Amino acid sequence: MAAAAAALAAAEPPPAMPQAAGTGGPAARRDFYWLRSFLAGGIAGCCAKTTVAPLDRVKVLLQAHNHHYKHLGVFSALRAVPQKEGYLGLYKGNGAMMIRIFPYGAIQFMAFEHYKTLITTKLGVSGHVHRLMAGSMAGMTAVICTYPLDMVRVRLAFQVKGEHTYTGIIHAFKTIYAKEGGFLGFYRGLMPTILGMAPYAGVSFFTFGTLKSVGLSHAPALLGRPSSDNPNVLVLKTHINLLCGGVAGAIAQTISYPFDVTRRRMQLGTVLPEFEKCLTMRETMKYVYGHHGIRKGLYRGLSLNYIRCVPSQAVAFTTYELMKQFFHLN
């Protein structure tokens, strides 16, 4: 979700058309544009996450070593979940994700524009650096605001048929609040999430920007095309754009993945039998490394993230373009 939302947040809004008399003030037109943009981004994010929801479910099960599937790999787990829980089992926790993705995309987009302007005007930083900084800060802001929804989504995704602790989203919220320290219980694992988001967003923005500039500089005719809203500007072709986004996401995931594993285990909290040994980020990383090592512990399920990166990006961009037409954003 973070890669798709970051890509959507990074997209520049099209230039405003000249204001016709009697059509409302500039502020009103701008407000309606942002509202339609939020809806377009939210729908695109939901479609992208639904497409890769089975991979997300399996990733949670593998990262936290669920005892029903801990001996399986990615593809064998994808076959085992429907056999044990039915095909809808692959989408467990996706409802909470859909509730989360809409505000996540809206907050990230709004925060990105605000931080970008702030960094440029107050710090005088521009180019790839200010985009990197603004993207990282916007991602962290969106994570903090929507973290409780992600917590509930992970708890629901970890459940196996016949062993349900939570009956649904609302019940999960009530149970976590009552049994795990009130409001603070919803923010278990926030620190590794924040520490993982900074390098993830930073590396992904930097890598994508570098690949784009190098590609357009050395092979403009092969990789680029004129922008539809400004023929004087050269942009990457759609399939090249998706490829660069996938490469950037894969590199960023490799660097930040141990923090993601740590976050998932801390989010699951009392659901795991080793709960008391994983109360802090340091304890959790030490436990995972000591019991499972690097490849089968801190990087367990990484191959799944590589597999889900390209289709997630493809669906997000394709749906977003369709929604831009539907909401008359072009």
Image (cartoon, rainbow, N blue to C red):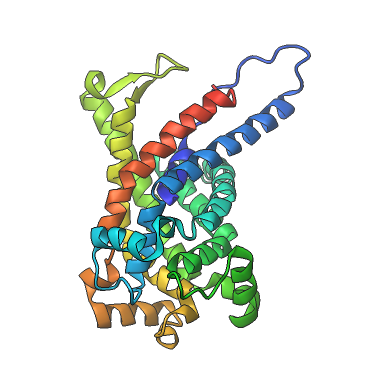
- Asked if one can make out residue 254 in the rendered structure from this viewpoint, the answer is no
Q: Quadrant of the C terminus?
A: top right
Could you tell me residue 241's position as x and y percent?
A: 33, 32
- The image shows residue 44, relative to residue 21, as above or below, that is below
Is 19 on the left-hand or right-hand side of 154? right
Considering depth in this image, is 313 or 94 the residue closer to the camera? 94
Could you tell me residue 248's position as x and y percent?
A: 30, 45
User: Which residue is located at x 78 percent, y 14 percent?
Assistant: 22
User: Which residue is located at x 46 percent, y 52 percent?
Assistant: 136
Q: Quadrant of residue 208?
A: top left
Could you tell me residue 101's position as x and y percent?
A: 53, 50
Q: Quadrant of residue 158?
A: bottom left
Q: How many marks?
A: 0
Is 29 on the left-hand or right-hand side of 287? right
- The image shows residue 174, relative to residue 48, as above or below, that is below
- The image shows residue 101, relative to residue 57, as above or below, that is above
Considering depth in this image, is 277 or 308 the residue closer to the camera? 308
